[in-house]
Every structure is written in structure tokens, then in C-alpha cells.
Amino acid sequence: MRTKIRYVASAIGLSASLVLVGCAATAPEGGSGSAPSSIVIDTAFTLETGDPGRNYVPTGYMVSKALYETLLDFAGSDESTPIPGLASYEQNDDATVFTFTLADGRVFSDGTPITADDVVFSLNRVKGMTESKANFLMEGIEVKKVDDKTVELSTATPSLKLPALMTNPSLAILNSKLVIENGGTTDNSDAAEKFLNTTSAGSGPYVLDSLDFESQVVLTENEKYNGEEDIDFTRVVIRSVSESATQKMNLEGGDSQVAVDLSGDQVAGLGDGVNVFSTPSAQTIFLLLNQSADVAGVTANPEFASAVRYALDYPALLELAGAGSEQATGVIPPSFLGALTDGVEQDLAASKAALAASGYAGETITLEYPNDYPVGGVSFTPLAERVQSQLADAGITVELAPAPFTTQIDEYVNGREAFSIWFWGPDYADSANFLPFAAGAKVGLRAGWTAEQDPAVVDLAAAAENATSMDEREGAFSAFASALQEQGPFVPLIVPGSNIATADYIDGVAYNSTWTMDIAELQSK
Amino acid sequence: MAGYLLRRLGMSILLLFGVTIVTFTLANLVPGNPIVAALGEGAASNPATVEAYIEKHGLDQPLPVQYLNYLVNLFQGDMGVSLRTGQPVASDLAKAVPATIEVAIGAIIVSLAVGVALGALAAYRRGKMSDQVVRVVSLLGLSIPTFWMALVAFNIFFLQLGIAPGSGRLSPILAPPPTVTGLYTVDALLAGQWVTFMDAMAHLMLPVFVLSLFTIGLLTRFVRTSVLEVLDADYIRAGRAKGLTGPRMLFGYTLRGASLPILTIVGLAFGSLLSGTVLVEAVFAWPGLGSYAYNSATSLDLPGVMGVGLVVGVIYLGINFAVDILYGVLDPRVRLA
């Protein structure tokens, strides 16, 4: 009898526990996290520091953008023209000297006024920390204080990309006094990272509440913020959710309000109660045909690149990319200065003629690509299979050779791939990011394309780099993109879409190629 | 017993040393350039950055020297700096390991309770309908892909029915409890944070359920076989002949007799749970050892990979050591072997 009573008591206890756990599941303290003043953003984390000067990864940029301000900014999704951030600017006629004047009355989150000393320290810190991944952004830029409100940046050669560079969150302006007190310097002896991983020292609309590199970052409102953003959400949780399927379910179930990494197919399947912001990203997926005789066989003949270029059915390839994606009209994606209006169209006769001129004799060409690294939701395996099929129709035999990204990238950057699929995205919002595709430049050399092989393209790249007016610059970049499209060893395929999904009461999403989205611009409808 | 303990301990230390050699060698044999993977293309093309990086991480040293440095640092509790998170691997793992242990302990408790009960039931009802049903259920537990099951369970219990919380260890509105053990449920209890405790328990439900399915299948089949063997033993027949039945027969004699092989399988299952949670952790955004291992491997974070390898090795060795000791306690003949 006593045994039976014990069993019954245990069963009641267990049931009560399950009911309590069930209650906790549906109603945690204060509701389910969707209170109007707070917001949860799910994204696949790329985060390795809270120090903006050392950051070079997407999630880090999104966080830095909310905590810190830069000299210049972009309005919404328009990345063509930098606008004033902490400062306005003027440039000389040669585009070698840029004078920045700080806005009046702006303060850091501890109330300290922002001065030219803070700007000089912050920029020189990135320039001096050669071990920082962001260090290259300050390459060739000299910083000089003019007065308490004015700073002069200068370069040896014309640099119309400099204003765009100054929007990059890695070049955020830090509270120099606070950072120096906590180990900050302007060389590799800098020891402020640990401090900046726990406390933000900026003037952005948010301050750092907590940061865990593997799970979540919590931001709260900066009560001293006196900039132009009018934030609606006073507490923001950015969570690490690597599976996009989980991001989708979290959003649909109300556990999060923003999902950053959904593919085109996933956003197409979203139901009511969700907004989707789809736009072309700034990534270009392309085929590379190596021009080095040492590395490649027939692909080294420029006619072979033309044969491939005109053999492909681009709209059919685009079917694999989903919402927001576009055909790549050149190496420069559509939102950037100098991007071409129209892409290549399939022309099987031109392909056939080029193939005959290339000396191709039916040999099998190996196509290499990373098979575990989708870009903007585009998986390279089905893309490679479709390229293989289309090239087979044009008389080119292709064998697929997939490999993990970490294995494949070494072959690619060292120029050891004859024929491969890769992608390229900007480090900052400017067309100068695509000049490395020139002969003799970084990406050009990965394709075995030396400066001697195409001096005309080298000249076009130099003209674009050294332009001193925007009109001149736009023309030069267009000419560069056109030349690459006609005679380069690259076949641009797809600009994948960026799809940001939100709860339906959220507005203000604007995609940016560097910081993905500005959290402070999110508004409650 | 002391000699037995020392022998087992010495063997474990030797094996641990072997684990460091294997993880270091394998990590450095992986094709690919960790510098490009760690710095990204932009930074990796900046010679000053690459040079500073190589110097900082000692990558310019020959491999044997790097290994010796690794061992020396390891003895000082330094497992290196993760190339991916930029943080000390030891501090990364100090957060990841408790997250996985928490879910693995939950899974092993559920597996033991359900697996032993079902296995014993099937053995006692050998050949009958309930035995057939249990065998089919256990086969399903073993054969359903865990990743798929995790997605299905999350969809049904969170999205459709709304009786389970979203992903992660805690609702976003709650702050983690003050760290004592790293197990949120335990730490919340220690801090007297009941709401946090209940929320952490709720978040444990689905990962524990999904993770335990495979182990339940494994244990059920194993317990069934073991109990059937014991049921055929002479001392059980004698007990039955004298009128022993019911729970006393089951718990007092049969399961006790089958406990050694069950202990072995529980030890192995716990080890595999700790190291095999990669996909479940990915679905539930659980920041544990599995997620850390996956992220480290895919980003060629060699210190991270070596750290995970070492921790998993230590856990396996620790479990084996504990199982060996329990063997010795439960069966004196083992100590003499």
C-alpha cells in the first residue's frame, strides 16, 4: 500500500513539474521577448571582438554600427553618396586632402564632448595596429588635427574612395580618454580590446550591455545620444542562430523579430505577419578562367573565356538564386558606381566561334568550387551542375571538383585553379573594391592574368583609381567594367539577394553591404 | 583496489598524451591556409597584418616546436587563442562545455529512465505484442536522423503547438544567472532565480528529447538483451522457484545482475552525447561543444579544433576511468584482472 502511495505521489510531482516547465516555456518573465521596446535579431554570428578598430566581420560591423559613429555615413540603402555622420567634409581639387569638420555639441555615451583629438586617436589607432584585420583601411592615409573641431586626412595620390572608407564601422570614433585609460594606444601595444569587449566607448544610439561571442550581444539605449537617429527599440538582443531554418521558425513563432540570413526560397515560404526586405547584395559570384599557361590548359586562351561567357543561359542560372538576386552585369554589382546596365546574353553562335578559335579539342575541364559555403543563399553545387550542363550543350566537357571552403580558398588565392566558381564582396562601399579584378591586381593574379597580358585594362583601372571628379570616376569605372566583360578571364554570373525578414510591425530595414542593416533605423509601425 | 586505481590512472594519462599528439597532428594536416581563413581575404593580402599574425601565433616555428610550445602552454592552462573568436580557447570552452553537459545529463537521465524501463518490459514480455512494439520503437529511435528529428520537433512543439520555447538556452528577455557551474539550471537555483530556472528547464526540453531518442533506442535494445540473459541465469530461476516476483525481482535481482553491461553502454552513450551534439546544437542554437567544434572546424580555427579534441578526449577518458572504477566496485574480480 505504501509503495502505491509513493508511486502516486511521484507521478503527481512529475506532472506538476512538467506543467510548470510548460508554463515557463510559453510565458517567461515579462512575456515572450516581443515587448514593444525590445527586439531580438537572429543571425549566423561572425563576431570576434567588441573593439571596432579590430573588427572585420559582418556581425561585428552590425554591432559596431549601433554602438559607434563614424565621420561619414550612408542614408538607408543608398551607398552611392556618403553623407555627414559625426562630421561634414570638403576636398581639394586633386582629391588628395579631405578636411572634416565635426558637428557641434556631439557627445560620447559618458557625456564627454567629441573632439578632433578623439578622431586623430581613433584613426591613428587603426593605422598603427598592424595586427588588426581592419588595418588596411587606413593604408596610405595621414591624419592631422587642424583645431579642436577640424581634422585633415591626406593621401599621396587622388583618393575619391576615402569618403566611403570613412563610413566603415572599423574607423569608428572612440572616446580617446576612456580608451587610453584602459590600455589604448596607437600601435600594436594597444590593450584596450578586453575593455571594449565589455564596455562600449562610443557615441552611437546604443551602448553595450553584454557580449558573448558564441551566443548573444545585448545593446541598450544610449541615454546621452544626441545624434539624428530616433530609436524605437531601447533594448536589442542579437542572437547567434547559425541554422537559417531555425531563424525562420523563431521569427514565425514570435521568438525573434528579425531574421537576417534567410535564403530566397525560405522567404518565399513565409506566411502572414512577416515583412521581407529583398534586394541585390553587393556580392558577385563569378567563374574564373586561369590565364597562366603553367596552371591551365585551354582556359588560358582568352577565346575560351569568351566561349564560356556566351554559352551560358544566365536567366536559367538565376533561377537558383531566389528573391532579391539579379544577373551580374559585370564584376561591379548594381548598387555601385560604374556598374553596367546590362549583362551578357547567351549567344551560342558567338560561343561556337570563340570555342573554335580557342583551340579546344574536346578535353575535359575541371571546375572547382567550395561546396559548403553558400553565398546569399546560393549553394555552389547546383550552380556548378547547371553550368556543367549548359557548357555540355555548347560542346565543352566539364568535370566537377567540389571541396570544403577552407581547403579550396588556399588554391584560389594562390592562383592554382584553372577553372573555378568564386565570389567577391566589398570591404567598404565603393567601386574601388572591384579594381583588384584588373590584370596584375589581386584577383586578376589569382586568374593568372598579369599586367603585361593586358596593359589596357591596367590603364583603365589606374584611371578609375586616380579620378579626381565623380563624373570622371563613373566613366572610368564603366570603361573598366566593360573591358573586363569583353576580354577578362572572369564570367560574372549572379549577384545573390539579401533577404531580411521582420515581424510585420517593424519598418525601416535598409540593406547595407558593409553593416548589413542599421539597427537604429528599425522602427515600430 | 589502490593498485587497480593507479594502473587505470596511469593508463588514462598516457592516453591523454596520445590525444594531444593526434589532435595536434590532425589539425595541422588539414589542407587549407588558416591565415587566410582567419584574417579573411582583405586582411590576408596586407603583408603587415599577416606578418603580425604569424608572429603573434608562433606559426613561423617548425611543427615540432609548435607542438612543444602547445604542450608547455597546456600545462599552464593555456589552450591558445581561437582564430575565430579571438578569445582564449579555454574561456570559450569553459562556456561551451557546461552548455553541452547540461543537455547531455538531461538526455542520459531521460534515456536511462525510459530505456531501462522499455528494455526490461520487452524482456519480461518476450515475444509478446508489447515486446514487438518496444523493439520497433527502439529501432526508430536508432534510425531516425537526429538533425531531421530536431527540425521536426522544433517545428511541431515550438511553432505549431507553442508548448516549447524558441531556440537558445534562455529567453532573450532573461539574463543568464551568475556563473558558478555554467549549468544554467543549477546556477539559477543557486541564485534563487526561479523564473530563470524554469525558463532554462523549458529550453532544455526539446534538445534533451531529441538527443535522448537515439540513446533510448540503444539502451532499450541493450537492456532487453542483458535482462534476457540474466533471466536465464540459475540464481534467477532459483529465485522464481521460491516465489520472487514483481519490482523486487526486477530491481533487486534482474537489473542488478545486468548492471555491468548497462553501465558500459551508459558511459559510452554519455561520451557520444557530449561529442555528438553538433547538429542538434545547430538546430536549437545551443552554444555548446558541438557548435564550437563545428564552427572551429569550418573556419580552420586550429587552436579551437585542438581544444575541442582535447576536451572530448578528457571527457571520454574520464568516463572510462569512472566506469572502470565502478566495475571494480561492483565486481571484485575485475580489480584482479
Image (cartoon, rainbow, N blue to C red):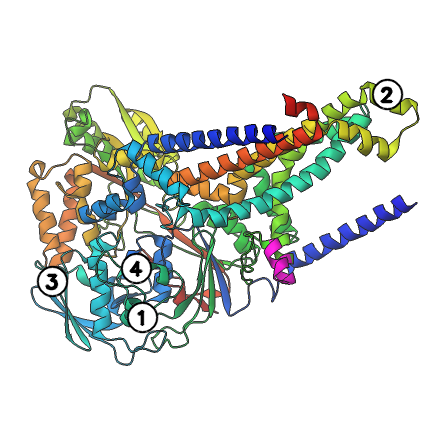
Instruction: Rate crowding at label 3 as few (under 14), some (14 to 19) or many (20 or more) other CA atoms within 10 Å.
Output: few
What segment carries the magenta color?
A: B185-197
Marks 4,2: beta carbons within 8 A: no
Mark 4–mark 3 distance (CA, rounded to whole Å): 40 Å
Counting other residues with Cα less than 10 Å from the Cα at mark 4, is it few (<14), some (14-19), or many (20 or more)?
Answer: some
The residues bearing labels 1 and 3 have C-alpha atoms spaced at a distance of: 39 Å
How far is the residue under mark 4 from the one under mark 2? 74 Å
Residue A341, magenta (yes or no): no
Horizontal side, residue A111 vs residue A3: left or right: left
- SS class, disc 4: loop
Q: Position of residue B118 (x, y in %)?
A: 75, 33
Disc 3 marks which residue? Answer: A469
Q: Nearer the viewer, residue B12 or A397?
A: B12
Instruction: Kindly state the secondary structure of the residue where label 3 is placed.
Output: loop
Looking at the image, which residue is at 24% across and 45% down?
Answer: B55
Residue beneath label 2, please? Answer: B237
